[in-house]
Image (tube, helix red, strand yellow):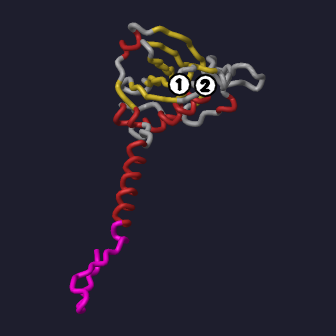
Amino acid sequence: MHSCYTRNSLNFRSHECIYSPLPIIMKKTCLLILFITSLVVSCAKKTISERFFDVEKPDLMFGGMIKSANPFQIEGENGKRYIREKGGVGGINIKIPELEKLYGANQIVTDSTKAILIIDFPLNKIIGYEIENKNGFNKKDLTIELSKVYSEIYTQKHKYGICCDNLEDLELTNILVFEVGKQIYLETKVESKK
């Protein structure tokens, strides 16, 4: 946008155009905002469901090495592992984990900064879920992560073939740590308390 003025005089006979710098500044500002927005959107973290992928069980069983087995249990009032009256130790509830009662909550499961959670129960297939934490993962971190993942899975129950097990009945009882090449897999053992 610009304005043109004509001067008719004896000494000056030309068209002199005066350009307003405002539209150019606005155009550059709009382009800058668009560029920054696209950067933010492209660098945004993936959603939980975007980090899911199908896993073949043989990938873990052949060529992988079990590094550790980590029980997830509730701490009783006496400071020891809780034993159910019906028998069995029981795990930590996935829907509403009582983290303050998690036995050995700060115990390191893996010091790897990246890992893949393997989830299969009560799904009709095995899925992997990429996780990352610059400090590695302790039991508390993994319980929180798994609670978020299962909450997302249960919003799409039909997609994973879940029909009979309610989220509030699921307990995390163990995580096996596998190393396949340089990749760490955390295979979850989830059971229904019914």
Residue density around tag 1, few if under 14, some if 14–19, many if 20 or more, within 10 Å? few
As helix, strand or loop, the secondary structure at mark 1 comes to: loop
Which residue is pictured at 50% across the width and 21% down the height?
188
Which of discs 2 and 1 lies nearer the camera? The answer is 1
Residue 113 is tagged as 1
Q: Quadrant of residue 164?
A: top left
Looking at the image, which is closer to me, 19 or 90? Answer: 19
What is the crowding at mark 2: few (fewer than 14 residues within 10 Å), some, or many (at least 20)? Answer: many
Left or right: residue 180 compared with residue 16 = right
Q: Please tell me whether residue 12 is drawn above or below residue 85 in the rendered image.
A: below
Residue 26: image location, x then y, percent: 37, 66
Q: Which residues are magenta?
A: 1-24
**Residue placed most toward the observer, 139 or 72:** 139
* Secondary element at image label 2: helix
Instruction: Give percent across and percent down for residue 79.
Output: 76, 22
> For the point 44% across and 28% down, which residue is it?
130
Q: Quadrant of residue 18?
A: bottom left
Residue 14 vertical position relative to residue 147 in the rendered view, above or below: below
User: On the image, numbered disc 2 is attached to which residue?
Assistant: 139
